[in-house]
Image (cartoon, coloured by chain):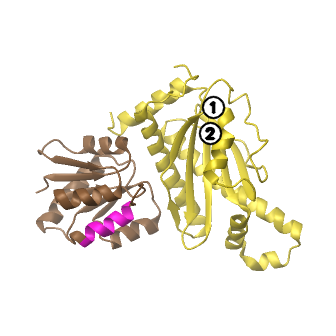
Chain colours: A brown, B yellow
């Protein structure tokens, strides 16, 4: 079951939008970070059930943060939310361990369904 | 809203506009990657509110060199309107040409033909990047823009004046900048979008409509 959600994005507007798009049917706990490095730090301390991760960020990019997160927990459920819609980007992050990739701006339906998939993945019902 | 102040956009509005440009540039990068078959590394966009007289200095500071440049200019006109500049170094322009046409074609041309081909190449690259980025921005803001043809304006910004019709000296402009790099190639360029504040009230409303539409408000 998904309880703790970490949102890593340098845009406060993007973080707000993601939070609002998440269904209110569960008492989720939200954690936020505005760059890849603080996202990795939050991941270590909070141990979230799912991470929404942007790629183009200052200090540490989302690509680097994803690598770090996967080193910490190879079963981490990371959903990449990015404006970088190049096919190679999608292939790369999926290969690096991301569960899903969503292009920006995400719709509420995409967020809801990705959260559902992350829940199934964490329960072991769905594979990466 | 009086466009004669530097705080014409709130921090949240600036963040939202930056995010819109980030999405738009992602689209531009994907278009470019398709055409030249190279992977484009995106950077975090920057937004500044500047007076027309400050823009030239800002651009020169950002690109960190004042000569050896190829600059492509294109104007976009809709409710959002302004000037876009793609800035590449001479060396990068040469590399781009070889990526697009291969070295073989250049060998059969004389010096002036190569220079012309380089200009045409960077102008076309500028057209693709600017068009994809500005069109996606307009789409996200529920606007529609038309363009002037892309124009190669030479190698330096000094002496270049923004048209007063679009950029009143007494007001400010919203300047967005992003850097793009091609992976495994020593090629990078800068894209600047200089937005006039002529329709500032409309722009602010469009930004808030975007935020509402995607659940940001």
Observer able to see residue A4: yes
Q: Which residue is mark 1?
A: B51
Q: Residue at x 20, y 69 (%)?
A: A73
Q: Nearer the viewer, residue B152 or A119?
A: B152
Q: Which residue is mark 2?
A: B194
Q: Quadrant of the C terminus of chain A?
A: bottom left
Residue B196 lies in what quarter of the image? top right
B28 vs B149, left or right, is: left
Residue B122, position as x, y percentages in the image: 71, 59
Number of labels in the image equals 2
Q: Quadrant of the N terminus of chain A?
A: bottom left
Helix, strand or loop at label 1? It is loop
Look at the image and say whether residue B153 sits in the magenta stretch: no
Look at the image and say whether residue A68 sits in the magenta stretch: yes
Mark 2 surroundings within 10 Å by alpha-carbon count, few (fewer than 14), some (14 through 19), many (20 or more): many
For residue B217, above or below residue B151? above
Helix, strand or loop at label 2? It is strand
Q: Residue at x 33, y 63 (%)?
A: A65
Q: Nearer the viewer, residue B205 or A60?
A: A60
Tell me the magenta residue range.
Answer: A62-71
Cα separation, mark 1 vs mark 2, equals 11 Å
B131 vs B140, left or right, is: right
For residue B96, above or below residue B135? below
Q: Disc 1 is attached to a residue of which chain?
A: B
Residue B141, position as x, y percentages in the image: 49, 37
């Amino acid at each position: 079951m998904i309880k703790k959600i970490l949102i890593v994005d340098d845009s406060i507007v993007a973080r707000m939008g993601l939070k609002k798009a998440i269904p209110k049917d569960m008492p989720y706990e939200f954690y936020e970070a505005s760059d890849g490095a603080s996202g990795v730090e939050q991941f270590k301390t909070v141990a979230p059930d799912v991470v929404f991760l942007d790629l183009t960020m200052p200090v540490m990019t989302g690509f680097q943060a994803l690598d770090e997160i996967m080193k910490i927990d190879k079963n981490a459920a990371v959903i990449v939310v990015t404006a970088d819609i190049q096919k190679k980007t999608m292939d790369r992050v999926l290969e690096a361990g991301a569960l899903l990739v969503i292009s920006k701006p995400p719709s509420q339906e995409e967020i809801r369904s990705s959260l559902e998939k992350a829940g199934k993945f964490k329960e072991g019902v769905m594979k990466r | 809203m009086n466009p004669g102040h530097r705080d014409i956009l709130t921090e949240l509005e600036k963040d939202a506009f930056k995010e819109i440009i980030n999405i738009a540039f992602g689209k531009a990068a994907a278009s470019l990657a398709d055409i030249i078959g190279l992977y484009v590394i995106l950077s975090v966009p920057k937004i500044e509110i500047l007076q027309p007289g400050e823009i030239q200095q800002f651009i020169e500071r950002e690109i960190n060199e004042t000569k050896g440049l190829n600059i492509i200019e294109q104007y976009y006109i809709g409710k959002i309107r302004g000037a876009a500049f793609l800035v590449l170094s001479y060396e990068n322009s040469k590399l781009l040409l070889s990526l697009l046409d291969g070295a073989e074609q250049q060998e059969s041309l004389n010096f002036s033909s190569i220079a012309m081909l380089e200009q045409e190449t960077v102008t076309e690259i500028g057209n693709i990047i600017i068009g994809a980025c500005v069109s996606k921005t307009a789409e996200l803001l529920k606007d529609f823009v038309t363009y002037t043809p892309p124009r190669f304006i030479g190698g330096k910004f000094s002496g270049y004046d923004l048209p007063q019709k679009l950029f009143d000296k007494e007001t400010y402009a919203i300047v967005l900048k992003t850097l793009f790099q091609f992976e495994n190639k020593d090629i990078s360029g800068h894209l600047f979008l200089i937005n006039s504040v002529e329709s500032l009230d409309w722009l602010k409303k469009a930004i808030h409509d975007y935020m509402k539409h995607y659940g940001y408000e």
